[in-house]
Image (cartoon, rainbow, N blue to C red):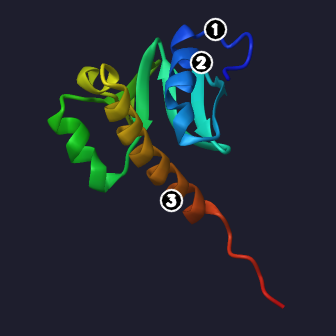
Amino acid sequence: MAPRGIGSELAAYLVELLAPLGGIGARRFFGGVGLVQDAVLFAMIMDETLYFRVDDAGRARYEAAGSSAFSYGTKTGTRTIAGFFTVPDAVLDEPEDLRQWARGAIAVAAAAKAKRRPARRQG
């Protein structure tokens, strides 16, 4: 369930739609909303646009579907974040397709999080 006060009907709708994946929630994320599965951020909603986490291997799929990377303006120009791409409109229209693409985004986000974790010392 989306927390109160995050101000996105889209977030609440997506949390409900993606609920079959298990552990889906929403939280404040900079100027928008982040979607998480078991504390792993796999998507964000900025200005009512949904972005999924992508990696180098999956980026071509998004580009082929007409998606673009998340970007925002700064005082010195535009900054692009290549790790998040818009979800194609056709995917948004089909709940099972959306869940399939979300599974991919979750896998990418989990792998990225695992890489950042320091190895535990044994002994």
Circle 3 sits on which residue? 111
Residue 27: x and y in percent read: 67, 26
Tag 1 and tag 3, C-beta contact below 8 Å: no
Label 2, label 3: how far apart the Cα atoms are: 25 Å
The part of the image, by quadrant, that contains residue 36 is top right
Classed neighbour count for the residue bearing mark 3: other residues with Cα under 10 Å, few (<14), some (14–19), many (≥20): few
The part of the image, by quadrant, that contains residue 102 is top left
Residue 96: x and y in percent read: 35, 33
Quadrant that contains the N terminus? top right
Q: What's the residue at 49%, 34% (across, down)?
A: 43
Label 1, label 2: how far apart the Cα atoms are: 11 Å
Question: Residue flagged by tag 3: what amino acid is it?
Answer: Ala
Q: What's the residue at 56%, 9% (across, down)?
A: 9
**Nearer-N-terminus badge (1/2):** 1
Task: Tell me the SS state at disc 1.
Answer: loop
Question: Can I make out residue 83 in this image?
Answer: no
Circle 1 sits on which residue? 7
Task: Tell me the SS state at disc 3.
Answer: helix
Label 1, label 3: how far apart the Cα atoms are: 29 Å
Question: Residue flagged by tag 2: what amino acid is it?
Answer: Gly
